[in-house]
Image: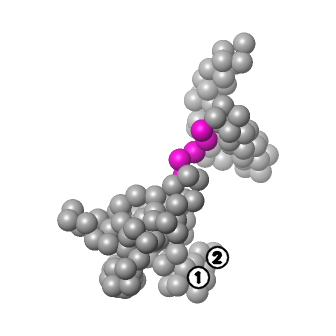
Amino acid sequence: MWGFSGFPHKRGLRGLVLFLLARGPKNGAELISEVERISMGHWRPSPGSMYPLLDELTASGAIQRRPDGRYEVSARSRDEFSFVRGWMAGPRTPEEMVHEISGYVSYLEDLATSDPQGDWQRHRDELRALAQRLERIAK
């Protein structure tokens, strides 16, 4: 089930596709690209994996194909994935937002420590501008 670099293949693709479709409708090509994006380029499912899986999920009633060619989770699956919509909606209160920002700052601190010359450095000006905006809010 697991491929190189720890990314799921075959059976793991099923859960990932359902998760992505719970976030919103997508066609097969969009799903392939989204898997590649979230795996940071480590895994790009082939059309020979994706489209038979979409057919199987449609036949089982887990997803349905819309007239525009995109797939979406069925009403039955929507109930099972209702937690995803809430989780993906992001923070809803200032307290949740501050907590999330704190996590991102921790991530950037880790990058600065573990990869001081990394690609993230090209965003330093944007980070400074964000820090100034946060400073104005905190006054």
Q: Assess whether mark 1 and mark 2 are in contact (beta carbons under 8 angstroms).
A: yes
How many circles with numbers are drawn on the protein?
2
Magenta region includes residue 105: no
Q: Residue 130 appears in which quarter of the rendering? A: top right
Query: Alpha carbon of mark 2 to alpha carbon of mark 1: how far?
Result: 6 Å
Label 1 residue SS: loop
| Magenta segment, prevailing SS (helix, strand or loop) | loop
Picture layout, residue 130 above or below residue 46? above
| x then y, percent, for residue 26 | 35, 63
| Mark 1 nearby-residue class (10 Å; few <14, some 14–19, many ≥20) | few
Q: Seen in the image, is 120 located left or right of residue 61? A: right
Amino acid under label 1? Answer: Gly
| Quadrant (top left/top right/bottom left/bottom right) for the C terminus | top right
Amino acid under label 2? Answer: Gly
| x then y, percent, for residue 108 | 71, 42
Give the number of the disc on residue 3: 1
Give the number of the disc on residue 6: 2
